Image (cartoon, grey):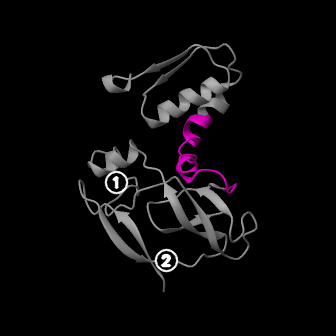
Amino acid sequence: MAKGTRAVMPRPYEVEIEEYDIPEPGPGQALIENEASAISAGTELAVYTGIHQWLNDPTRTWPRFPFVPGYSGVGRVVAVGEGVNKVAVGDRVIYEARHETHGLANMAGIITPIGPDVSAKVAAFAVLARFPLTALVQSGPLIGQTVAVFGQGLIGQIALRLFSAAGAYPLIGIDPVARRR
């Protein structure tokens, strides 16, 4: 079986690179060779430091150590399982990628083809944008409306840009962390 490498957090404040068996795609899955993945500075940092709110919640199964981080990336489809017709071998896609050389994407999840000229560094952030995009879609018409975004980390900054593109004005970014203001 072919081998890949991935980042793993075995416990708080530790990251290791480990080798793993690259899986074969099952029905409804595509195997992606990753080009880039984005780091979610909020979620992944909270897991890394051991302070994520769900780590000690017995009703949650995620996240748990050892933890393979990542959930937003871009890559090329290298194999597809039975019943896959949304993407084909050779397609570049954005999907819920981990920080690993190869990952499986479920067709029921987020997987979207992108063009060959789209920057992998930019496309890797697309899945993270789903959170503020959901807020935008649920907000209704925004032209000329005041919008305040609480938190100016990565997701908050993406939110401000999306609301700006939708015509909201003025935009107010609020964050208790001085360097984010």
Q: Nearer the viewer, mark 1 or mark 2?
A: 2
Q: Within 10 Å of the Cα at label 1, are there few (<14), some (14-19), or many (20+) other Cα atoms?
A: few
Residue found at the very far right of the displayed protein = 85
Camera-nearest residue between 110 and 39: 39
Q: Quadrant of residue 14 in the image?
A: bottom left
Q: Position of residue 104 (x, y in %)?
A: 56, 68
The residue range painted magenta reads 113-134
Left or right: 46 as drawn, with respect to 97 = left
Q: Amino acid at mark 1?
A: Pro
Q: Residue at x 42, y 33 (%)?
A: 153
Residue 23 among those drawn in magenta: no
Q: Is residue 30 left or right of residue 37?
A: right
Q: Residue 16 vs residue 82: left or right? A: left
Q: Give residue 115's quadrant in the image.
A: bottom right
Residue at disc 1, secondary structure: loop
Q: SS for tag 2?
A: loop
Q: Which mark is residue 22?
A: 2
Q: Position of residue 177 (x, y in %)?
A: 32, 25
The disc at residue 58 is 1
Q: Position of residue 82 (x, y in %)?
A: 70, 77
Question: Which residue is farthest front?
Answer: 117
